[in-house]
Image (cartoon, rainbow, N blue to C red):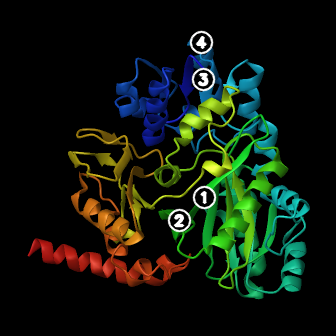
Amino acid sequence: MFKRILIANRGEIAVRVFRACRELDIEPVVVYSEADREALHVQLAEHSYCIGPASSAQSYLNTDAILTVAKAAHCDAIHPGYGFLSENAEFADECEKNGITWIGPSGDVIRMMGNKAAARELMKDAGVPVVPGSDGSVADAAEAKRIADEIGYPVLIKAAAGGGGRGMRKVFDPDQFEDLFEEARAESRACFNDDEMYLEKLVLNPHHIEFQIMADSCGNVVQLGERDCSIQRRGQKMIEETPSRVLTPELRERMGEAAVKAARAAGYVNAGTIEFVLDPSGEFYFIEMNTRIQVEHPITECVTGIDLVREQLRVASGLSLSFTQDDINLRGHAIECRINAEDPAHGFMPSPGLVDFVHLPGGYGVRVDTGLYAGCELPPYYDSLAAKLIVWAPTRLEAIRRMRRCLEEFVIDGPKTNIDVLHQIMYHPGFIRATYNTSFIDENLDTLLAWTNAADVQEEA
């Protein structure tokens, strides 16, 4: 096992990895930007280094600075968390060249799976179902439109290097295709410095189902069940739960087998996620692989009893998985709500600032992953995620009731948050009955905001 690991991230995931290191008697080394000088992960650490100004390009994406710290601090490995450099193939390569273990898949695998058009072709060759669409990337709007006309509308224009809903456009009207294609390509160029695009048939009103996999260098690949991530706004997940109510045991087994097949085809090692869309008829299709730990990994930990970050560290050090497929038994139900510092009443505009007071919910089956504390500053330069509220219970209904109670107890004074909207979702019949899909927020946001406003008025009265 490693002696010292550099955590190349910030916020709740930096705290999460820090704690896993401490429990394994590994010395964690943290880095921070000038804006994060008082962040929780910095205050917890004995070894912390400033790597640049507030801008992520000059700090958390500054590979030279991070490698310099890793070498100066004699780190054996780097854990990238999620976001920032976690899917940067070149940085993974640089770590290995400098004799520092990258806690994740190899640069070659990240590169292969990061290009979603190439990953799609790999999955087709491996026999994993994929959504009908272009064979690889398309040269220009004219070629893309020709393919769209062949497969039929609606279609989905996607950036090969995309993620988080960026570089993606839905097209229902052929007359709008070329304008939307150029719009998506421009966004991809701005966000990812890459304008390679591809095309898929748009599956209407699907469920977004992802399978957690873990693989080691000994050839073992295990899937740890699914997460339903269909409660989304503009491609950004808001609520995740496991297990999914829409999967039958037979369908769960088939999708799990496809996830393992996908990981083996990629030659994958470490933690990863295979993402599928599930259409209303029960057919499922591969859409992408995330080559890192996911924001929503805690709910899988709750129902499996397996510490995924601990397994990441074990696998990266050359050890085999501490479990087999036969050891995976999903127990109970878990839900995660992403608590974001944003203002739902004004288009979910980011709401950074000083946290005057915070009260975190607790009790049996409750977990809060966060970097929040009273008096901390939520800087305006990064993602608005402030905390993850995770609950577990023996049944789904008990988990929903526990989440309601916890959202009622969660207090953040200062920045605006989405807590009230999440609370209203927990009472919505579509969520309670698990009849929701990826269009849930689009179809119900006005109602949810109205309920939230009415609750606020009643509270003030």
- Give how far apart the Cα atoms at labels 4 and 3 are: 14 Å
- Give how far apart the Cα atoms at labels 2 and 1 are: 7 Å
Q: Is residue 7 above or below residue 433?
A: above
Give the side of residue 406 with respect to residue 257, left or right: left
State the mark number for residue 74: 4
- Give how far apart the Cα atoms at labels 2 and 4 are: 41 Å
Outermost residue toward the front in this view: 326
Residue type pointed to by label 1: Gly
Q: Quadrant of the C terminus?
A: bottom left
State the mark number for residue 225: 1
Upstream in sequence: badge 2 or badge 1: 1
Residue at 69% across / 33% down in the picture? Answer: 320
Percent x, y of residue 201: 77, 78
Residue type pointed to by label 2: Pro
Q: Nearer the viewer, mark 4 or mark 1?
A: 1
Instruction: Please give the residue where the numbered disc 2 appears in the rendered image.
Output: 243
Upstream in sequence: badge 2 or badge 3: 3
- Give how far apart the Cα atoms at labels 2 and 3 are: 41 Å
Q: Quadrant of the N terminus?
A: top right
Percent x, y of residue 76: 63, 18
Q: Nearer the viewer, mark 2 or mark 3?
A: 2
State the mark number for residue 65: 3
Q: Nearer the viewer, mark 2 or mark 4?
A: 2
